[in-house]
Image (cartoon, rainbow, N blue to C red):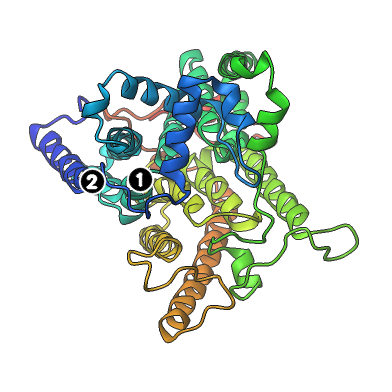
Amino acid sequence: MRAFVTRHERLSVGLVLLLGLLIRLPVVPVDIRPPGASHDVRWFMEWGRTAHDVGFTAVSDGMADGVGLYPPLSLWILYVLASIESLVPQALRGGDTLMISLVKLLPVLADLCLALLVARLVRARGPVVAVVGAAAIALNPAFIYVGVGWGQIDSLYSLFLVASAALLARAPTTARITGAWVAWVCAALVKVQGLLLLPLVLVVSIRDAGWRRALVGGLVAATIVVLLFLPWLQGGLPRYLETMSRVEAHTTHNALNTWYVIGLGRRRSDVQRIIGPLTPRLLGYALVLLVAGFVAVVVWYRRAQVGIALPAAVLAMAPFMVLTGMRGRYLLVAVPFIILLALGWDRRHVLPRAGTVAVMVIITQTINLLLVVSPDPSLWRDFMDPHARGTLLTFVRGVAFASAVANVAIFAWLVISLARVARRPPDVARLTPDVTGQLPDVPEPTAAPLTSPSVTDTIVR
C-alpha cells in the first residue's frame, strides 16, 4: 500500500479489499457441489493429498481417462496445502472442511492481490481510478464465482500475467526483464493457458532490453521449469505430459465464443474434417498462432504506440475465442487487461469505448459462469444439452447466444483497435507518468524508418 500516497487513498482501496474479503469469507468452507460429485475442489483435494502421502508421480499415474492434470506449480501448491492439513489433528479438520477452506483461500488471496496490483498500476490516473480498479476485481462477480465458489485458480495465473506485463512496461533493467520472465513462467506452470503472453514477453524483452537480458530471463525461467519438473524427471514424465496435454474433443466445451456462434449453440466434434485434413482443432491452432504473430509484429514495430495493455488484452482473449474445447471460465484472464485498458494504464491513445467494453466482458463472463454452474441445479443442468427442453432453458440459450455474439464483437474491437492504434504516429505527450509524476526520457520522433525499433521507444511508468 506504500504506492498510495495519501491516507485517504490507502483507506479507500483498503476498504474495497476488505469488502471483497468479507463477501468471500462465508463461502470459503462451503462446497457448493453435491457430495461425491467430481469437480474442481474435489480434484484439487485428491491431487494435493496424493502428492503428499504417496508422491507426485502417483498423481499423474492415477488420473482417470479424459481428465486433464494441471502443470507442476499447481501441484506443488496443492502439496503445500495438504502438508498444512496434515499438521492439524484429525479431530479439528471437520472432515474435508479444512482442506476445502485451504483450497479456496488460495484464489481468494489471489483475487485481492490482483485487485491491489490493478489499483497500484492505475494509481497515476488519480485516486478515484485506483479505487475503481480495485473494485473491478475485488467486487467482480465473475472472480467471486470462479474463485470462492468453484475454488478454481484462474485468478492466480492471471495475477502472474498482469505482474509480468507490469514489469515489461517499466524501464528495461535486467532485474525487471528477468522478473517478467519469472512471472510469466509461473503463470504457465499454474495453468497451461498462461503460455498466452509469451509473444509479448519475448518481443518486448528482446526489443527493449536486448537479446542478452532476454536470454538471462529465459534461462532463469527454464531453470524454474526444470526444478518444478524434478519429481517426474526421475520417472513418469511421459505419462504426466500426456495427462497435462489432454483437451476437450468439442468445438466448445461450454465457452460462449466464436465456435459457439458458428455452431448456433451446439457442441460439435473438433476433429471432424472441414476441408481435406483441416479440422476445427487445427483451424483453431492456426488462428491463435496468426493472432500471436500479428501482435508480435505490431509490438516490435509500433511499441511506443500500442504499449502493453492493448496487445496483452488481445493475446489473453484470443485462445478463448478461437481455440476449440474451451471452457467458459477461460475468458477470465482477459478481464484484468481489459479493465487496465479502460482505466488508462499504459495506453498511448484514448480508446473511448474501452469502458463500455470492460463492462460488457464482465457481464458476458458472469453469464457464462452462471450458465455452466446454475445457482440452483433445478433451473438448468446443461444449457448445451440438445435434448433438454423447457421455456426457461430456451430463454437461457438465447441469453447465451447473445453473450457469445457480444464476445465476438469485443474481440474484433480489440484486434481492430490494435491495428488502428499501430498506424498512428507516436505521441510523447500521452505517455503515462510514473508514481513520481516523472515522464520518461524519450526523444522527439524522427523520420527514421519504423523498421528499426530503438530502445528509446521504451515506456517507463
Q: Is residue 209 left or right of residue 146?
A: right
Residue 90 at least partly seen:
yes
Q: Secondary structure at mark 1?
A: helix
Query: Residue at 15% across / 37% down in the picture?
Result: 14
Toward the viewer: 402 or 151? 151
Q: Residue furthest right?
A: 276
For the C terminus, give its image quadrant.
Answer: top left
Tell me: residue 409, above or below residue 200: below
The answer to whether the residues at label 1 and label 2 have Cβ atoms under 8 Å apart is: yes
Where on the picture, by quarter, is residue 450? top right
Residue 423 at least partly seen:
no
Check disc 1 and report the residue beneath it.
Answer: 147
Q: Residue furthest bottom?
A: 391
Tell me: residue 366, above or below residue 162: below
CA–CA distance between discs 1 and 2? 9 Å
Q: Position of residue 126 (x, y in %)?
A: 22, 42
Query: Residue at 19% across / 46% down in the picture?
Result: 26
Check disc 2 and report the residue beneath it.
Answer: 24
